[in-house]
Image (cartoon, rainbow, N blue to C red):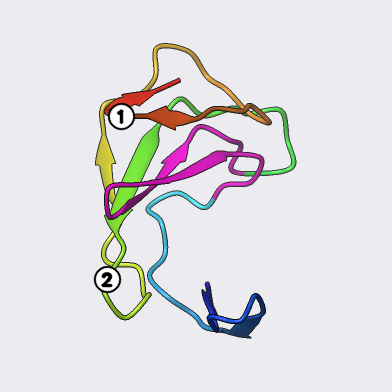
Amino acid sequence: MRRSTGNGTVGTWQTTSSMAIGREDFLGVAYNGYLYAFGGTPDVDVTQLSSVEYAPINVNGTVGTWRTTVSMDVDRESHGGVSITELFM
């Protein structure tokens, strides 16, 4: 995690909480005070994930405890998406 310095640059990297499943090639979305991680792959193999995790973004910029929520109906990796009001697409 890096915090913005307010002048367009970013500060130093800090360690924060870990997700339940380590993943790469996932979709990350910040929305309404939470950080979401959709799908991805847990390894360099061809395994793909359908799981979704979320964590609160604390006022000091750190990330709270990650929790799992309802999984997507298909596995995905290297995908894109956006948040529009209360919908994730």
Give the residue pinned by disc 1. 85
Give the residue pinned by disc 2. 58
- With 9 as the anchor, is 56 left or right in this view? left
Quarter of the figure with residue 44: top right
- In depth, the one of 69 and 47 nearer the eye is 69
Q: Residue 85, how many percent across, how many down?
A: 30, 29
Question: Residue placed at 61% from the left, 37% from the top?
Answer: 41
User: Which of pointers 2 and 1 lies earlier in the amino acid sequence?
Assistant: 2
Q: Residue 79, how many percent across, how many down?
A: 64, 26
Question: Residue placed at 52% from the left, 52% from the top?
Answer: 22
Q: Neighbour class for label 2 at 10 Å: few (<14), some, many (≥20)? A: few
Could you tell me which secondary element the residue under label 2 belongs to? Answer: loop
Q: Is residue 55 above or below residue 60?
A: above
Type of residue at label 2? Asn
The residue sitting at the bottom extreme is 12
Q: Is residue 11 above or below residue 63?
A: below
The C terminus lies in quadrant: top left
- In depth, the one of 64 and 7 nearer the eye is 7
**Gap in Å between the C-alphas at discs 2 and 1?**
21 Å
Residue 32 shown in magenta:
yes
- With 20 as the anchor, is 32 left or right in this view? left
Q: Residue 68, how many percent across, how many down?
A: 28, 41
Could you tell me which secondary element the residue under label 1 belongs to? Answer: loop
Type of residue at label 1? Thr
Q: Which residues are magenta?
A: 23-42
Quarter of the figure with residue 84: top left
- Give the number of marks: 2
- Nearest to the eye among marks 2 and 1: give it: 1
Q: Residue 39, how many percent across, how many down?
A: 51, 32
Q: Neighbour class for label 1 at 10 Å: few (<14), some, many (≥20)? A: few
Question: Residue placed at 27% from the left, 28% from the top?
Answer: 86
- In depth, the one of 56 and 84 nearer the eye is 84
